[in-house]
Image (cartoon, rainbow, N blue to C red):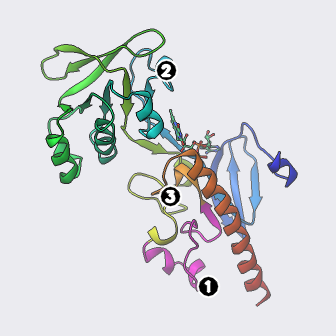
Amino acid sequence: MQADKFGARTAVPREATGLRREEGHFRIGLSDGGEAAALGVIVASGARYRRLDVESLGRFEGVSVHYAATEAEAQRCEGEEVAVVGGGNSAGQAALFLAARTRRVYLLIRGEDLGKSMSRYLVDRIVDARNVELLANTEVRELGGEDRLEGVVVEDNRSGSRRTLGARDLFFFIGAQANTGWLEGTVELDERGFVLTGSELDGSAFDEASWRERSREPFLLETSMPGVFAAGDVRSGSIKRCASAVGEGAMAVRLVHQYLADAGGQRKA
Ligand SMILES: Cc1cc2nc3c(=O)[nH]c(=O)nc-3n(C[C@H](O)[C@H](O)[C@H](O)COP(=O)(O)OP(=O)(O)OC[C@H]3O[C@@H](n4cnc5c(N)ncnc54)[C@H](O)[C@@H]3O)c2cc1C
């Protein structure tokens, strides 16, 4: 309703396929061959969370299968057994957080060595934690239960032997892929494909002619292309939660106004 009130026009279900700057305007290519022209752009195309290819995963999502470990999830599995899948720092932090609230945490990694992908301090804390069991070379094969998860069948990927864990909640921390294919070659991305903004941009972005003529550094959520902002999951370093994505969106709108005022001042000068 608010978007309507401010005159927003929606282009559903068209996909943005490219972005370029031309004679002071941004032109966003659309999948139907059309274009949208704008004086400022906010990129909020999010990320796709990696999912395991396990039968009936979708049935348990939001009930017993989670992609975040916050107070809300911890309360749901208080005193129970849970399994965490992933070998990165986010998986390690989640395992330790859940260990304080649950009976047992199984930490599942596909590889041999947790230290290859997780910071040493987290590995040490996991090894020391009394109720965290690390299962290396282990992959999820089946999920049991009707309305709620009642067991997780896992397989040792070297021997092929299987066992059933009594976990009633399953947490995935296996990464996300940014929806930035349409931006490649236009704005700077980090090594994982998320959009770099503000102080995360290194000096090379400022050498561009478009920055030199502005003689300012990028605003907080501004990308390497002046006037193009990024908000939410697509942005490198963002928190990847609903509330933060909405908050960043609101901030980005405010910054677009600041950019337009600045650009207007420059045009007059
Ligand atoms: C299973 C799951 C559970 C979650 N649970 C929680 C939770 O309980 N609490 C919480 O706070 N967060 C949760 N999150 C995270 C939360 O969903 C995200 O942080 C939030 O949705 C990010 O908002 P966003 O607007 O940045 O991106 P998104 O919500 O991903 O929106 C991006 C939109 O852009 C569209 N898009 C992508 N590329 C293009 C393109 N080229 N052209 C046009 N449109 C495009 C996408 O289709 C999508 O509609 C969960 C995420 C997942 C996957």
Q: Give ligand 1's quarter of the image.
A: top right
Residue 116: x %, y % from top left: 18, 46
* Mark 1 secondary-structure assignment: loop
Q: Residues within 10 Å of mark 3 (few under 14, many from 20)?
A: many
The label number, if any, that marks residue 58 in the structure image: 2
For image coordinates 52% across by 48% down, the residue present is 181
The label number, if any, that marks residue 195 in the structure image: 3
* Image: magenta residue range: 202-229
* Mark 2 secondary-structure assignment: helix
For image coordinates 14% across by 23% down, the residue present is 158
Residue 128: x %, y % from top left: 14, 42
**Which quadrant holds residue 225?**
bottom right
- In the displayed structure, does residue 37 sit left or right of residue 96? right
Looking at the image, is mark 2 or mark 3 earlier in the sequence?
2
Which residue is identified by label 1?
Answer: 213
**181 and 253: which one is in front?**
253
